Image (tube, helix red, strand yellow):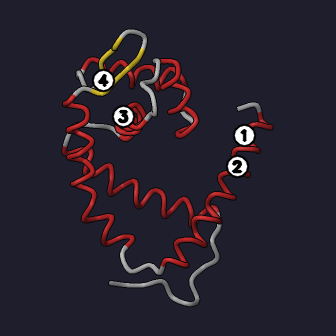
Amino acid sequence: MTSASTTAPVADARNLALAHYAARGVLEHVLARHGVTFQQQITLRAAATSETPPTPDGLLVQVQRSLKAEPAGIRATIDELLERRLLVADGAHLVPTDAGRELLAVVGAGTAPFSARIWGGIPAEDLAAAGRVLALVTERAEAELAALGA
């Protein structure tokens, strides 16, 4: 296993993007085995982890907040999940089906060994520092998006 060098580059937007896309690439490899897209998985997980079952509009807002994706694309994703019977309407709300929950469990199990190798061995204090920096970057980027009217 390799570890970060003491002369590692300073965190910046490029390094953050490279880490994101590398990790996302691993996840998308696992998702492809199950015929699921990244946006479908994010949308399904959002529905499954909501404190209360979301309405379609509520789910759209939640996913848009996470992915910064266009509403039309998110609506199409919700429709795909409904068509595949991974989500169902329960009155005015959307809930994952047993198949949807099973898919999330299978994807979680499929990514677990990769996650263990990617994150394993990183000292807790480094993870805490990275978490603080990422939270601050997210907060600032969200403020910039709000100022842009996005």
Residue 53 at x, y percent in the picture: 42, 24
Q: Which residue is mark 1?
A: 145
Q: Which residue is mark 2?
A: 141
Query: Does residue 92 sit above or below 145 in this rendering?
Result: above
Q: Earlier in the sequence, mark 3 or mark 2?
A: 3
**Disc 2 and disc 1 in contact, CB within 8 angstroms:** yes
Residue 14 at x, y percent in the picture: 60, 63
The N terminus lies in quadrant:
bottom left
Identity, as a three-letter code, of the amino acid under mark 2: Ala
Are there few (<14), some (14-19), or many (20+) residues within 10 Å of tag 1? few
Q: Residue at x 54, y 59 (%)?
A: 17
Q: Residue at x 36, y 18 (%)?
A: 79
Q: Which residue is mark 3?
A: 48
Q: Earlier in the sequence, mark 1 or mark 4?
A: 4
Are there few (<14), some (14-19), or many (20+) residues within 10 Å of tag 2? few
C-alpha separation, residue under disc 3 versus residue under disc 4: 9 Å
Are there few (<14), some (14-19), or many (20+) residues within 10 Å of tag 4? many
C-alpha separation, residue under disc 3 versus residue under disc 1: 27 Å
Judging depth in this view, the residue of 73 and 94 nearest the camera is 94
C-alpha separation, residue under disc 1 versus residue under disc 4: 30 Å
Q: Residue furthest bottom?
A: 6
